[in-house]
Image (cartoon, rainbow, N blue to C red):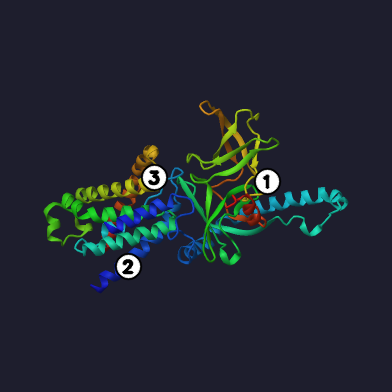
Amino acid sequence: MLLLFISLVFTIQSHSYHKSKFINSANWLTGGIYEQANGVSSYFSLKSENEKLVEENRRLKSLLFSKEDSLTNIQYIDSTSFGTDYLFRAGKIIKNSYSKIDNIILINKGSSDSIKTDMGVITPNGIIGVVDRVGGSHATVISILNSNSKINAKIKNTNFYGTLTWNGKNANVVQLEDVEKLATFNVNDTIITGGDSTLFPKGIPIGMIKDFKLNTKENLYVVDVQLFNDMTNLENIYVIENLYREEIDNLLAPEN
Amino acid sequence: MGTVVFWNSVRFVIAVLVQVLICNHIDFLGYINPLVYIYFLLLFPFNANKSLFLVIAFILGLTIDMFSDTGGAHAAACVIIAYIRPFVLRFSFGISYEHQSIKLENTAFGQRMLYIIILTFIHHFFVFLLEIFNISNILIVLRNTLFFGIFTILVITLSVTFFSRKNS
């Protein structure tokens, strides 16, 4: 009976954001075993991963060279402050799940790599989730395919914001909720991160509008978003650190 | 006694590893994975100390929880089936269970299936109830219980049949 009670407490804790203190896979034992297993299984996806990375390189190269003329003409007022708002760290997913209601991803970077709770995680194609628990050399990420995940997003080229959630049905479709009734958009419009939170920089692509319907009770749209990422096939990721996060949080925190 | 402890420890480790490294990645039809680790609990010596069995079931469930980030859902479900196992044993094997000398491989097929089916469905129901933890999603809980349960029962029945050959 006591054991049943303890396990129920763990269960309830796991359902509130940032609460599951002991039982998570970011410890040395589970992290180590998953790392070993991933070391083997990652060989099977080497080819497709390489293609993805080459594609990203190609895109970045073309960006770089098409911008060259304009770059040399820009006069920076203070060159040291340019581009240092966000720090990107590369990492690898060693355990991914997408078939449950609350999916959690394990990555091979932890506190020894300066990973902290509440950092954003992305791939070249879009966002993945937010870092939750951090262990020595592993960390768990609350996937966007998680009923607790709520991420600020907006429709590209407009100023209509919404909250990105997931209804647990399709691993490649998420929902953008609470979009104003006034918003004008079409199917196939792009959804990007909003930049209202300190988790993600503004403008990271998320997906395309697949379908939408009006919630007549609240006069808000619920938009189905087809993700650019294939959530079932992920390997290389970037963890984003917002260097001004503490400052921003302090400014926004209510005065005591 | 020593060999029993040893072989059950080995079985424990194998059950966990098979579950988290292989069976959690099958994703049959997109989401169906058998929870075969309860094979360990079904096979655990019938005449073992009851409180020891409860503690071991709890640890097994907690280990699975740790690997799959599910809080305590598996631990709770394991403790529940460990607690009710004696009643299910009496129900499905009748009086011969009282002799406490039977082994799962030596029982009649129908009785063995009854025992496996009852415990599997109870375990799965509680796992999904606690994992999803939302009464409005009760249909998903029942659907998962049914589909995962069928898959688990299939795998466990097959492995009982295969491994009993070797032992006898």
Residue B17: in sight, yes or no?
Answer: yes
Query: On the image, numbered disc 1 is attached to which residue?
Result: A202
Q: Position of residue A136 (x, y in %)?
A: 53, 66
The type of residue carrying mark 2 is Ser
Would you place residue A157 above or below residue B66 in this image?
above
Mark 2 element type:
helix
**Which residue in the rendered view is the most extreme toward the front?**
A256
Q: Are marks 2 and 3 on the same chain?
A: yes
Residue visible at 48% across and 49% down?
A: A103
The type of residue carrying mark 1 is Lys
Chain ID, mark 1: A
The residue carrying pointer 3 sits among few (fewer than 14), some (14 to 19) or many (20 or more) residues within 10 Å by Cα, namely some
Label located before the other in sequence (2 or 3): 2
Q: Position of residue B118 (x, y in %)?
A: 25, 47
The residue carrying pointer 1 sits among few (fewer than 14), some (14 to 19) or many (20 or more) residues within 10 Å by Cα, namely some
**Which residue in the rendered view is the most extreme toward the bottom?**
B2
Chain ID, mark 2: B
Residue visible at 60% across and 59% down?
A: A91
Q: Position of residue A213 (x, y in %)?
A: 55, 28
Mark 3 element type:
loop
Q: Which mark is residue B9?
A: 2
Residue visible at 35% across and 58% down?
A: B61
Q: Position of residue A119 (x, y in %)?
A: 59, 55
Would you place residue A245 above or below residue A179 in this image?
below
**A72 on left or right of A86:** right
Query: On the image, numbered disc 3 is attached to which residue?
Result: B133
